[in-house]
Amino acid sequence: MLFTPEIRHPIHLLVITCLVGTAILWLSLPTSLWADSQGTIPSPETLRGCGGASFASSDDAFEQEVLRLVNQARMDNGLLPLKRVESLTSAARFHATDMSEENYFSHTSHDRVNNELVESCSWSDRVNRYYTGWNFVSENIAAGFGTPQAVFNGWMDSPGHRKNILSATNWETGIGYFKGSGSYTRYWVQDFGRRSGVYPAVINGEDPTTDDGQLRIHLYGEWESLRLRVNQNEWSEWQPFAPLIEMALKEPIGFHTVAVEMRTATQSAVAEDSIYLAQNTAEPELNDLPDALTFAYSPTEGLILPDVHTIQPLAAQSDSSFAWQVTADQSWLTVTPGQGKGGEIVSLSPSVQGASLTGTDQAVVTVSLRRGDGSVADEKKIAVLLRVQAAHTLFVPVLQGR
């Protein structure tokens, strides 16, 4: 039965929840980032049967806003946010498109044959066409609502739909929105699921972007410890598991992926999620500085060669909240200048005064990059040697004649 699109009432919505036997399947975890929608153009051929075609959304931003509202409601109720996955999104978009273009409103898929509707596929078989290996799936549908907020409110006002949105059993989701030729013009579908062996990581409630790089990573499952890495860099040290990890992303503008490895004594899993960083939060790094520098002192000539070594702590620096500092732990080595914020050249000059001149004197130069609060962002230690050349005595043989 169809209802007029103006009626914003729970009878305007349908819900089915299905629980089946567990299927064990390990799958890689897709990221939450979405390119511009691309897909097959809806046609009687691509809409026929149980799905399989991939259609574009009528409005990606509408789908993302529904997801934001859903995940905010879950977190407000002490639940983890849902992970958006491509397979459930494709299933939801197919059904939203199919309902519009075949002009019906039902969880069960239909084909229009000789202008008559014919049931073609159960809703769970349709979802399974895209989302395999599941042990739980559920679905919300709606029609006629003009905005993400309106359809979200309608679902939350309906006990069955609200139960799906706030179910701790659901871990993954996909949302489909299509505006087309059907009687209700706008059609909405949200599919939910959970797969055995898949433990999602969800960054910032599935917000696709961040300005400041502050990340809140929600993790599913029960584990003992975890470690993280960003963009295939080195793994962090193992730390106790927590369902929420907070971290600061210090990277340039662009897409960045955070991977999390989780483990117990008997099993482990890796999850990852990606996010677009809209502003540069990367901290400057020190230049590639030498590990050691050497001066040679000739007592007979009274010369030190070379008379100076130079280093450049930073190639450039535009962020005034960072400053570099160079210090030496021996008085015979002079550092000029000792601090700065740009690409200045630092001179290291030795003096025999203060040196022990026992063969080799050593100093340690510490080059540090410090944040505005004085904490160290990067540091390098350079060993500086002052070698004393041994004085050579020339012996002339005495010649004696007979």
Image: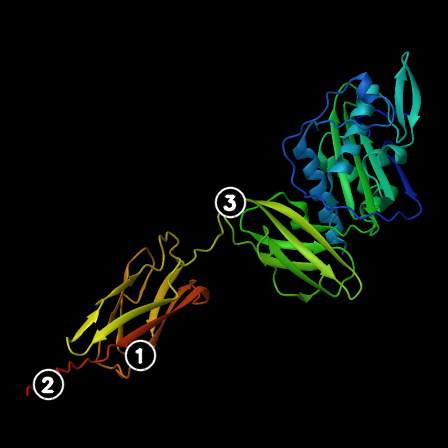
Indicate the amino acid at tag 1.
Asp
Q: Earlier in the sequence, mark 3 or mark 1?
A: 3
**Could you say which quadrant of the image residue 365 lies in?**
bottom left
Residue 112 appears anywhere in the view: yes
Q: Which residue in the protein does label 3 denote?
A: 253
Provide residue 336's location: percent of width, then percent of height. 26, 67
Q: CA distance from mark 3 to mark 2?
A: 79 Å
Determine the secondary structure under disc 2.
loop
Say which of 254 and 108 sits in front.
254
User: Dot 1: few (<14), some (14–19), or many (≥20) neighbours within 10 Å?
Assistant: some
Determine the secondary structure under disc 1.
strand
Residue at 33% x, 76% y is: 363
Provide residue 344's location: percent of width, then percent of height. 29, 58
Could you tell me if the residues under marks 1 and 2 are in contact, i.e. CB atoms within 8 Å? no
Q: CA distance from mark 3 to mark 1?
A: 46 Å
Q: Which residue in the protein does label 1 denote?
A: 361
Residue 243 appears anywhere in the view: no
Q: Can you tell which mark lies on residue 398?
A: 2
